[in-house]
Image (cartoon, rainbow, N blue to C red):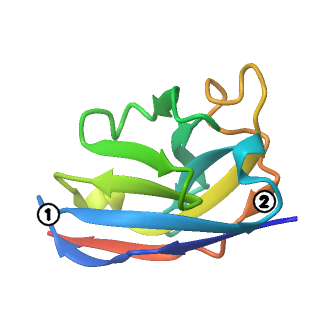
Amino acid sequence: QLQVVESGGGLVQTGGSLRLSCAASGTIWDDYAIGWFRQAPGKEREGVSCISNSGSSTNYADSVKGRFTISRDNAKDTVYLQMNSLKPEDTGVYYCAAAGQGLYTVQRMCAPVNYWGQGTQVTVSS
């Protein structure tokens, strides 16, 4: 069993930055790719970014490319999502998720997910 807990959400103005953290505990962290998903009110949950278990491979949704950066510190069992140039459409609940590392896991944006966090709210005001 792996537990993941998000932190770092909040309220920010358009053009601002936030850094989300996903801290893990439980089973072997190194076996899992870690992804960030978000869900805006009235919309389906969507994949934002995914990083492989080693950190050597990443993937981003087109809507965040060039603005968001995912990274991981395996010594701290933590994954980060640096979000810059935030837009109102980035508003939503951001979820951290763990997916068993496979050959195409990162390409599939960390699907299928094995473990979900409870989410952290990000609100970007216009």
The label number, if any, that marks residue 115 in the structure image: 2
Query: Which residue is label 1 attached to?
Result: 16
Position of the N terminus, as image quadrant, is bottom right
Q: What residue type is labelled 2?
A: Tyr
User: Residue 26 location, x and y as percent?
Assistant: 80, 68
Measured in 3D between alpha carbons, the distance from the residue under mark 1 to the one under mark 2, in whole angstroms, is 30 Å
Q: What residue type is labelled 1?
A: Gly
Residue furthest toward the right? 1
Residue at image coords 34%, 40%: 64
How packed mark 1 is, by other alpha carbons closer than 10 Å (few <14, some 14-19, many 20 or more), is some
Residue placed at 49% from the left, 30% from the top?
59
Which is nearer the N-term, disc 1 or disc 2? 1
Q: Nearer the viewer, mark 1 or mark 2?
A: 2
Q: Choose top left, top right, bottom left or bottom right for residue 86.
A: bottom left
- Location of the C terminus by quadrant is bottom left
The secondary element bearing badge 2 is classed as strand
Q: How many marks?
A: 2
Tell me the quarter of the picture where residue 90 sits.
bottom left
Residue 58 at x, y = what percent?
49, 30
Q: Is mark 1 on a helix, strand or loop?
A: loop
Which residue: 45% across, 66% down? 21
Q: Mark 1–mark 2 contact, CB under 8 Å?
A: no
Which residue appears farthest toward the top when viewing the image? 103
Residue 87 quadrant: bottom left
Residue visible at 16% across and 52% down? 85
Horizontal arrangement in the rendering, residue 4 relative to residue 46 (left or right): right
Rendered location of residue 111, percent (x, y): 73, 38
Residue 40 located left or right of residue 86: right
* Camera-nearest residue between 119 and 25: 25
> What is the x, y in percent for residue 93?
50, 70
For this view, does 76 lie left or right of residue 102? left
The foreground one among 79 and 76 is 76
